[in-house]
Image: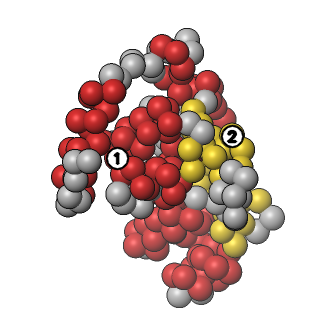
Amino acid sequence: MDKNIGAACEALLFAAGGAVEFKDLQEALQISEEELNTALKELIQTYEAEDRGIRITMIDGKYQLCTKHEYYEDLVRLVNTPKKHVLTDVLLETLSIVAYKQPVTRVEIEKIRGVSCSHAVNRLVEYHLIEEVGRLDAPGHPILFGTTDDFLRSFGLSSMDDLPSISPDRMEDFRKEAEEEAGLVHVET
């Protein structure tokens, strides 16, 4: 077998992730049907002969890289392992606003942060740390966001009452810092 054709088949099947039609492999590799048949047969034999965790399966004219059955239990343990989410400063800042101001709209979060927060809100929803808790009775009926039970679990809180309280003086300091960072002038009244 031409090693380049075998390696190319392997690369295509790996990158595709799912099943690939024979004709699609043939077109991508720009080789004859016979060349592809030979390459795939040899590649399948190589995977079966060697002690590897994957194999190539053919189902209804489609080829796919698959895990060998004997490694199924190991795969299940990996897939069922909870994923750890990385909370960047932007995500933590947005999450803090939601936690302390909930229920809160995306526009209110953006007003506090001074920048767009669509990505951060979407990521926090994806991580199940915040969720839609209703709609504001205003034009457009914007979504109201609040924290979830996963938020409480993730931060070791039994209720929202366990959030650290912030004194009004400290809140005023935070507001002034945020305005300075945003380039706004604070006028004493």
Instruction: Assess disc 1: are there few (<14), some (14-19) or many (≥20) residues with their C-alpha within 10 Å of its C-alpha.
Output: some
Q: Is residue 22 left or right of residue 97?
A: right
Residue at 73% across, 53% down = 137
Decide which of 124, 170 is in the foreground and name it. 170
How many angstroms separate mark 2 from mark 1 (CA)? 22 Å
The x, y position of residue 183, in whole percent, is 20, 60
Residue at 57% across, 33% down = 147
Residue 6 in view (yes/no):
no
Residue 56 image label: none
Give the colouring mode of the picture.
Answer: secondary structure
Extreme-right residue of the structure: 60
Decide which of 1, 87 is in the foreground and name it. 87
Q: Name the residue under label 1.
A: 90
Residue 119's place in the image compared with 24, above or below, is above
Q: Is residue 173 left or right of residue 111?
A: left
Q: Is residue 167 left or right of residue 49?
A: left
Residue 13's place in the image compared with 55, above or below, is below
Residue 87 falls in image quadrant: top left
Residue 162 in view (yes/no):
yes
What amino acid does circle 2 point to?
Answer: Val
- Determine whether the residue tagged by mark 2 lies in a helix, strand or loop: strand
The x, y position of residue 152, in whole percent, is 54, 21
Residue 138's place in the image compared with 102, above or below, is below
What amino acid does circle 1 point to?
Answer: Val
Q: Name the residue under label 2.
A: 133
- Specify which label sits upstream in the sequence, 2 or 1: 1
The x, y position of residue 30, in whole percent, is 53, 87
